[in-house]
Amino acid sequence: MMKCVFVTVGTTSFDELIERMSAQESLRIFKSLGYSRLTLQIGRGTVVPEPFSTESFTLDVYRYKDSLQEDLQRADLVISHAGAGSCLETLEKGKPLVVVVNEKLMNNHQLQLAKQLHKEGHFFCCTCSMLPGLLQSMDLSTLKCYPPGQPEKFSAFLDKVVGLQK
């Protein structure tokens, strides 16, 4: 069976993540972990890796789709920016998730959200520079399942994090 990694940045641009994921070092790591397909959803980024396909590995690249459902469904591992929508959608699908925090964003409410869900053991969280090491050392079986279908709890939590409610 073909194991697939899906990287998503949502509607934003996160060139550092896309650059890091399409670098030879990352491709080597993915192959060594048994993955044979990498799909990059690059949003409005300026880094546009060249798609390729060899006998052992395929790299797909696109900007946007109406829905990420198909890619999430197919993914064995999701690497995402810390956007609430992307994180929640992935967790509700029960997919292993690595959230990469964009350190270049100021007043990063994404970081608070990511830290909390990471603390609860639902996904791994790191920065771009820590990602290669994390990919090689993480144990996906230690992740806790996120209880699906509780959007009101999530939105209350989000409101608290971004300071809309005490």
Image (tube, grey):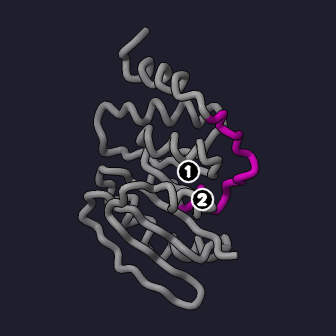
Q: Nearer the viewer, residue 119 or 72?
A: 72
Q: Position of residue 113 (x, y in %)?
A: 47, 32
- Please say if 125 is above or below 139: above
Residue at 51% across, 71% down: 38
Nearer to me, 78 or 125: 78
| Distance from Cα at disc 1 to Cα at disc 2 | 8 Å
Compared to 21, does 139 lie above or below?
Answer: above
Looking at the image, which residue is at 26% across and 58% down?
Answer: 44
Q: What residue is shown with label 1?
A: 98
Q: Is residue 135 left or right of residue 17?
A: right
Residue drawn at point x = 42 percent, y = 55 percent: 67
Give the x, y percent position of residue 18. 38, 63
| Label 1, residues with CA under 10 Å away: few <14, some 14-19, many ≥20 | many
Q: Characterize the local packing of mark 2: few (<14), some (14-19) or many (20 or more) Cα atoms within 10 angstroms.
A: many
- Which quadrant would the N terminus be assigned to in this image? bottom right
Q: Residue furthest top?
A: 166
User: Which residue sits furthest right?
Assistant: 141
- Location of residue 21 in the rendering, given as x and y in whole percent from the top left corner: 45, 66
Q: Quadrant of residue 22?
A: bottom left
Which quarter shows the C terminus?
top left
Which mark is nearer the camera, 1 or 2?
2
**Mark 1 vs 2: CB contact within 8 A:** yes
Q: Position of residue 155 (x, y in %)?
A: 47, 24
Nearer to the camera, 129 or 86: 86
Does dot 2 land on a helix, a strand or a loop?
Answer: strand
First in residue order: circle 1 vs circle 2: 2
Residue stretch in magenta: 132-148
Query: For numbered disc 1, what is the local secondary structure?
Result: strand
Q: Amino acid at mark 1?
A: Val
Residue that carries the numbered disc 2 in the rendered image? 77
**Residue under the image location 70 percent in, 53 percent down:** 140
**Is 114 left, or right, of 103 in this rendering?**
right
